[in-house]
Amino acid sequence: MAYDSESFGLAWNEGRGGFIFAMAFIAAELIGLKVQVRKNRLFAVLVLAALTIGYFVALPYGLKDSIQKTGEENKVALIFSWVQMWDFIVMAAFTGVASFLLFGKNWYKIASAGAIFLAGNATVLALDAFFPYDSLGALQFIVPIYLQIDQSIVSFIDQNVMDVGRGAVARGNLLVLNGLKGPFALQVFWPSAGVDSMIIFSLVMLAFLLKMEIPRKNKIIYFAIGAFGTAAVNVTRIISLTLYALIGTTDPTQWEVFHSVAGIMMFLPWLGIFLTVVLFTEGRRVKKLNAASSGTVQIASGISYRGIAFVIFIMFFFVVSLLVSYFSVIVLIDQNKVTGQDVYGYFGLALVPPTIASLLLYTKVLGRFL
């Protein structure tokens, strides 16, 4: 980061912002962990770190051109994704091997989320590089469903909240908009629909759930709720982008800036909230089990129906409040109360109220009734 801080953007297949979030996952797993590491293992990790740093230092001195040339020779469709893929492969390999050296063969039970997050990003970039646009039908099938939901919700907003123009019309993976700022047409492919975040969510959640000492039934329930919540966040992202074009701007450059960062901006707070909710819920359940084991009261070992209902409720609360927050910013843009570069700062700040409100609502209010 110190060497090339400008490359740590959040734009899809152009920025290394994902490295920062991988560091956050690693930190979350290692905080409070007390492990004695042998000097020879630590030395091996330092050597590995030096080699990894050497890779990134060498990129602007011909290595990046060589990677790009290799992609062109192998007829890779999207070179940007191909080049970015190797950055994530190198970081995933470093994180995984370093964790193995530090923690031994059970490293995946201690600190695997960061490596899995990086590997997930590398996998998605590889799919995007070799199977761009709609060439991978297995990942593209969900797009028309998302767009139909988008059309329905935009129509509801137009009829019951405020005038957004003629609204949105979805046909297959095409979305035609005719709003207050003029016409705008989109062709939506699977990365823009959030299929990438679904893949990454699945991998990260598996990493956390597999190492948690909780009943298998609970793991399945949490994973199912989380996957559905990720899909809901993806739909919220598409709706926000649609409203931005209908109400905010039809300038392709301005719209693309928001589009390139909206996915990771919305997905990672949701992932953080969901993991916090799971850990909090399981912590309360374990405390009740421990209290019951010392008395005569018998309680079920699995998550209760009330707990499931609360987790689902907080998912919907976050999604709805996120949509309201972004809609408010877009309305301010329409009224020229937010202009220029301030637009993107407000889009970032719009994440704060839904995130904090969701966490406080669950841990301080709903958590008392678990």
Image (cartoon, rainbow, N blue to C red):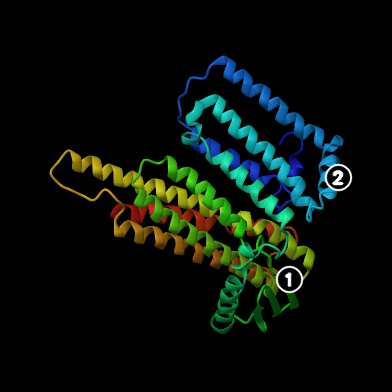
Whichever of labels 2 and 1 marks the residue nearer the N terminus, that label is: 2
Spatial CA span between label 2 and label 1:
37 Å
Type of the residue with mark 1: Thr
Q: Secondary structure at mark 1?
A: loop
- Furthest residue toward front: 74
Circle 2 sits on which residue?
Answer: 69
Q: Residue 199 location in percent, x, y?
A: 57, 54
Within 10 angstroms of label 2, few (less than 14), some, or many (20 or more) residues? some
Q: Secondary structure at mark 2?
A: helix
- Where residue 51 sits, quadrant-wise, is top right
* Res 258 visible: yes
**Residue at image x 76%, y 29%?**
54
Mark 2 against mark 1, which lies toward the viewer? 2
Work out whether 63 lies above or below 202: above
Q: Quadrant of the N terminus?
A: top right
**Residue at image x 74%, y 62%?**
256
Disc 2 + disc 1, Cβ < 8 Å: no
Circle 1 sits on which residue?
Answer: 249
Is residue 132 left or right of 274 when viewed as pictured? right
Type of the residue with mark 2: Lys
- Where residue 176 sits, quadrant-wise, is bottom right
Q: Residue 84 location in percent, x, y?
A: 74, 46
Is residue 20 left or right of 251 when viewed as pictured? left
Q: Residue 271 location in percent, x, y?
A: 52, 51
**Residue at image x 72%, y 42%?**
86
Within 10 angstroms of label 1, few (less than 14), some, or many (20 or more) residues? many
* Res 24 visible: no
- Furthest residue toward left: 296
Residue 154 — which label? Answer: none
